[in-house]
Image (spheres, rainbow, N blue to C red):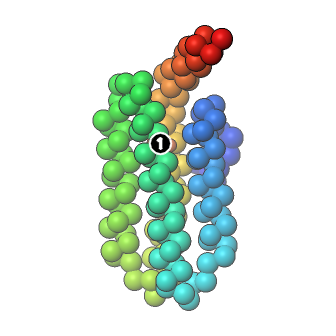
Amino acid sequence: MENNWTDKYLLNIDQIDQQHKVFFEIWDKEIKQVDMQDQIQLACVIEKLEDYLKDHFKYEEEMLREFDYKDIKNHIAQHKFFIQKVDNLKQELNYKNPLLFEKTTVFMKTWFLSHIIQSDKKYQDPAIEYLEHKDFLNNIISQ
Ligand SMILES: [Fe+2]
Ligand SMILES: [Fe+2]
């Protein structure tokens, strides 16, 4: 598996793709800029990445709920697992040790990439079908 965003991670659902992609942009930018000696900054970067993903999960779950995705429970459980895991890592984390910072941020990135490929991809077809239908109905209503 590649360790960075590429087009093979696209779901062809604009909002979702945009959100997925932006996470990796933020990740790259934050990691490049962070001062490894500054514990508060390290904590802030993890917080920022986690908050971004929490917002994304919320958006995604809302959409899955809207079209009654059959595997929604399992999908939400995966998001929850991730948040729990990051919270555990944060507790474990001694920010004086840059290796643990790296362990946490790399976990976030690789988990998210494999989640997109293994789980988000599974809702791709029913979601596109639902969104196209919704667009179609909206067009009729607005005519
Ligand atoms: Fe997801
Ligand atoms: Fe997602």
Q: Which percent across, then down, holds residue 32? A: 67, 73
Q: Which percent across, then down, holds residue 9? A: 61, 40
Residue 48's place in the image compared with 131, above or below, is below
* Number of dots carrying numbers: 1
Q: Check disc 1 and report the residue beneath it.
A: 59
Residue at 58%, 18% in the rendered image: 138
Front residue of 64/105: it is: 64
Residue at 59%, 47% in the rendered image: 19
Residue 15's place in the image compared with 54, above or below, is above
Front residue of 142/87: it is: 142
Quadrant where the C terminus is found in the figure: top right
Residue at 51%, 20% in the rendered image: 130
Residue 5's place in the image compared with 41, above or below, is above
Mark yes or no: residue 56 visible. Answer: yes
Q: With 16 as the anchor, is 75 left or right in this view?
A: left
Q: Which percent across, then down, holds residue 116? A: 52, 42
Q: With 46 as the anchor, is 69 left or right in this view?
A: left
Q: Mark 1: few, some, or many residues within 10 Å (few <14, many ≥20)?
A: some
Q: What residue type is labelled 1?
A: Tyr
Mark yes or no: residue 115 visible. Answer: no
Residue at 57%, 39% in the rendered image: 16
Q: Is mark 1 on a helix, strand or loop?
A: helix
